[in-house]
Amino acid sequence: MSVLPYLVAGYLILIGSYGIIRSHHLVHAVVCLSITQSGTYVLLLTVGYQHSATAPVFGSTTRPSTDVVDPVVQAMTLTDIVVSATVTALLLALTVQINKRHGTVDPDELIALRG
Amino acid sequence: MSRTARLLLFAAGASVLAATFVAGTFGMPEFGGSEHLYRDLAVPAAVAHHTANVVSAVNFDQRAIDTFGEETILIASTLGAVTLLRPSREETVRRPPDLGHTLESTRLVGYLLLPLMLMLGADVVLHGGITPGGGFQGGVILATGLHILYVTGSYPTLDRLRPTGPFRAAEALGGAAFGIVGAAGLVGTGAFLDNFLPFGSFGQILSTGTVQVLNIVVGVEVVGSIVVLLGAFFEQEISVRKRSEASR
Amino acid sequence: MTALLVLSLVLVAVAATGVVLTERPERQAVTLSAFGLTLVLLLMMLQAPDVALSELGIGAAVVPLMVMLTIRTIHKDHHDRDGS
């Protein structure tokens, strides 16, 4: 049971990849890619967790000597979330252009690269 | 490659990945254990620099060069997306049509929420060094708060309220300002992005040195980036139309 | 491992399966938003308020909005193509 968090992270990565493989619509594939990215966030954060430790923010109630969870993985994950949203936007913009040029967004019909 | 062939190939690769991943998880340190080497180094360093929010300290003080790199990714992908969505020669940009009917209560709630969200976003950005929050989160809240006007049905108002020129300038300035603050650290103490401003007392807004300045800079940049991005998508959906044959 | 943590992990897995198995992308915008909310719950359980704030804004507002706008642009283009 104590490996459940890591298994959930691996499951998210695999189910997202499965969704990309089996998709009929490019926007569906982009959303499944976003699921895969969330799997990596879950893995990072569960590596840094400690039981009965608090959030890494100190204040009047939390003195700097209390146990906190790992802040380094949280810092990596939070910039990653914002940046991956803009990369998703780039992929969606590509999808709009593909639709204009080829008239379809079904990956099975877009097999040939035309000049 | 047919769909079944693709699925079989994926099944082969995924099963190997799943098997090695599960084998790996049994060898990892226990979930919720107390052995975290990075934390033991990062937390005392943040406290020594009087920063209450350790995550902000890691982002803008200890690993600020990584945040600089992420900012450039942000700028680059926004640039790419806006370039891809620009109206081409075969398309025109027409005036946004009069959007349909929205309930009066929706409009009232929207107009009331707009200043609240903007204030909340500014608060989250400014207090980034001492409470959970920071430039990235506050920038996203500010950008989405502005788009409440779209929910209230007044896209023309939204269009007037967010002229893309100043927001593009804000994005570029934010990116450049990060580099300038870093270069100032280089000039001051010989290390790029060094925290050279004076520290105050623990738990005050101005206590964290350059973390505060970099929070504001990143907040400005994220607002500019997301507003420009959403603006390009909105324009593409609402205003851009194919140039008709008759007017060619 | 508290029961709440196990429950939020299971919810995340179920929501992700729901997103992947939703065939039509316009419906996926809604399920993606719900997945973002379950992920925020899990992030709060893991004592990560900064990350939860970030994920809430992005996963529940910005990305579903962009997905919906892309879908509408594509449908409008297909409609124009069929109509002309």
Image (spheres, grey):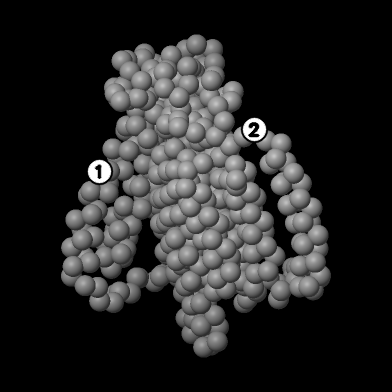
**Side (left or right) of B32 relative to B146:** right
Q: Secondary structure at mark 1?
A: helix
Q: Are marks 1 and 2 on the same chain?
A: yes
Name the spot of residue C67 as percent of width and height, x first: 49, 64
User: What residue type is disc 1 on?
Assistant: Met
Front one among B98 and A61: A61
Residue at x-position 71% and y-position 74%: A108
Residue named by callout 1: B119
Residue B73 % position (x, y)? 56, 42
Task: Please tell me which residue lies in front, A66 or B231.
Answer: A66
Q: Crowding at label 2, few (<14), some or many (≥20) Cα neighbours within 10 Å? A: few
Place of residue A38 in the rendered image (x, y in percent of width and height, measured from the top left): 56, 50
Dot 1 falls on which chain?
B
Mark 1 or 2 closer to N-term? 2
Image position of C56 (left or right of A45): left
Tell me which chain the residue with mark 2 is part of.
B
Report the residue marked by disc 2: B29
Task: Where is residue A79? Give x, y as percent.
Answer: 50, 39
Tell me: residue B201, above or below residue B218.
Answer: above
Q: Examine the image and state in which quarter residue C65 appears.
A: bottom left
Name the residue at the bottom extreme.
C83
| Crowd class of label 1 (few under 14; some 14 to 19; many from 20; radius 10 Å) | some
In this rendering, is residue C20 above or below B66? below
